[in-house]
């Protein structure tokens, strides 16, 4: 741990041997898509595997825990954490979207960060009024240095033939 980081940790009350909790806000930029993505706790009672995906008619039927306030995940270095991303289609028409590769800020703090997320070159469909979900996972290597790393995705609506061209690339 660098000197300034150790000093900040000690000032915050952490012991010299205990890893700091890292603040990981997950943010969304919407491109021709209604604002509707939320970050939820993973529900271990459901035992859904990484990448599990589906949709339900009501929020109460989601296989997820509570929404994480502000989409701010907290994690200590050396840990992984499953999450459930949920998108609610509040429109009266089917929506299709993809996630552009995430941007990390500050870039200098991104070494040792892993995110099995939505930016997998796939188009995600969401029918009107439905709640779409996907299980994802965040991880920090043991030697991760930093106290905050913002994760930002652009969610882009696609229409027409673009859906068919990208649906099965992997």
Image (cartoon, rainbow, N blue to C red):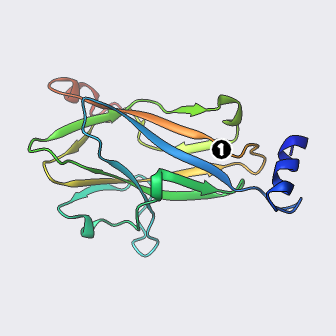
Q: Is residue 121 left or right of residue 20?
A: left
Q: Position of residue 116 (x, y in %)?
A: 50, 45
Q: Position of residue 145 (x, y in %)?
A: 76, 43
Give the class, few, some or many, for how many residues have Cα within 10 Å of label 1's Cα (few <14, many ≥20). Answer: some
Q: Secondary structure at mark 1?
A: loop
- The residue most toward the front is 11
Q: How many marks?
A: 1
Q: Is residue 123 left or right of residue 160?
A: right
Q: Is residue 85 left or right of residue 163?
A: right
Q: Is residue 67 left or right of residue 10?
A: left
Between 71 and 165, the one lying in front of the other is 71
Q: Position of residue 58 (x, y in %)?
A: 20, 64
Q: Quadrant of residue 20?
A: bottom right
- Disc 1: which residue: 148
Q: Residue at x 47, y 72 (%)?
A: 44
Between 93 and 11, the one lying in front of the other is 11
The answer to whether any part of residue 2 appears in the image is no
Q: Residue at x 41, y 36 (%)?
A: 120
Q: Position of residue 11 (x, y in %)?
A: 84, 55
The answer to whether any part of residue 27 appears in the image is yes
Q: Residue at x 29, y 46 (%)?
A: 36
- The residue most toward the bottom is 45
């Amino acid at each position: 741990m660098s000197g300034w980081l150790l000093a900040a940790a000690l000032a915050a009350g952490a012991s010299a041997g205990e890893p700091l909790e890292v603040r990981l806000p997950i943010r969304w930029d919407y491109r021709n898509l209604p604002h509707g993505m939320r970050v939820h706790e993973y529900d271990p009672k459901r035992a859904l595997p990484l990448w599990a995906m589906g949709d339900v008619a009501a929020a109460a039927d989601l296989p997820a825990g509570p929404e994480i306030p502000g989409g701010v995940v907290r994690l200590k270095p050396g840990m992984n954490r499953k999450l459930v991303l949920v998108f609610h289609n509040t429109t009266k028409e089917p929506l299709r979207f993809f996630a552009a590769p995430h941007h990390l800020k500050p870039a200098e703090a991104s070494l040792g960060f892993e995110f099995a997320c939505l930016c997998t070159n796939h188009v995600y469909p969401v029918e009107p009024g439905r709640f779409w979900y996907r299980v994802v996972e965040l991880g920090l290597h043991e030697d991760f240095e930093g106290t905050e790393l913002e994760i930002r995705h652009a969610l882009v609506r696609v229409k027409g033939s673009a859906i068919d061209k990208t649906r099965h690339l992997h």
